[in-house]
């Protein structure tokens, strides 16, 4: 990353921003087991069709999903499967951090009970 210019770093930041929205993560998660159309993604996400379409458009803009028209339907699928590796890495780090925080809370909880 140290050799990237400002323009490249801006693109990287926008890529991460695309992943920084829970609804987009929900859509990516829904596509993990195969392509789906907007109606299916709307049902899975519990959101509106307009909202899902907006998020799909941004995900497509950053090359995370691809779209394929078939008749009157458009199907979306994952364009870059490495996004799941990135998400697994981040989720693992968050899980580790949560375990550490729980351990620290446990230590203080025990210490509080021992204090007269």
Image: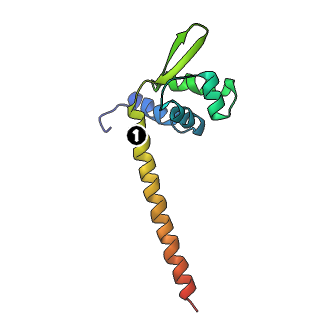
The residue that label 1 is drawn on is 86
| Residue name at image x 56 percent, y 83 percent | 112
| Residue name at image x 68 percent, y 24 percent | 49
Q: Is residue 115 above or below residue 24?
A: below
Task: Locate residue 57 relative to residue 47 in the image: left or right.
Answer: left
Task: Locate residue 98 relative to residue 71 in the image: left or right.
Answer: left
- Quarter of the image for the C terminus: give it: bottom right
Colouring of the image: rainbow
List x then y, in percent, for residue 84. Answer: 42, 37
Secondary structure category for the residue under label 1: helix
Judging depth in this view, the residue of 56 and 16 nearest the camera is 56
List x then y, in percent, for residue 20. Answer: 53, 39
Q: Is residue 65 above or below residue 91?
A: above
The answer to which quarter of the image holds residue 85 is top left
Tally of numbered tags: 1
| Residue name at image x 50 percent, y 66 percent | 102
Outermost residue, top side: 71
Task: Locate residue 4 relative to residue 109 in the image: left or right.
Answer: left
Task: Locate residue 28 relative to residue 72 in the image: left or right.
Answer: left
Outermost residue, left side: 3
List x then y, in percent, for residue 108. Answer: 52, 77
Q: Is residue 71 above or below residue 52?
A: above
Judging depth in this view, the residue of 25 and 34 nearest the camera is 34
List x then y, in percent, for residue 76. Answer: 52, 21
| Residue name at image x 42 percent, y 51 percent | 92
Outermost residue, bottom side: 116
**Local crowd size for mark 1, using a 10 Å CA cut-off: few (<14), some (14–19), many (≥20):** few
Judging depth in this view, the residue of 84 and 116 nearest the camera is 84
Judging depth in this view, the residue of 36 and 96 nearest the camera is 36
- Quarter of the image for the N terminus: give it: top left
């Amino acid at each position: 990353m140290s050799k990237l210019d400002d323009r490249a770093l801006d693109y990287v930041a926008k890529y991460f921003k695309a992943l920084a929205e829970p609804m987009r993560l929900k859509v990516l998660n829904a596509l993990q087991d195969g392509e789906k159309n907007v109606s299916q993604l709307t049902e899975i996400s519990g959101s509106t069709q307009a909202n899902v379409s907006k998020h799909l458009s941004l995900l497509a803009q950053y090359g995370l999903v691809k779209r394929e028209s078939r008749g009157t339907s458009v199907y979306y699928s994952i364009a870059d499967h490495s996004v799941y590796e990135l998400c697994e890495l981040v989720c693992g780090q968050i899980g580790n951090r949560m375990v550490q925080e729980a351990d620290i809370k446990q230590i203080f909880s025990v210490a509080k009970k021992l204090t007269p």
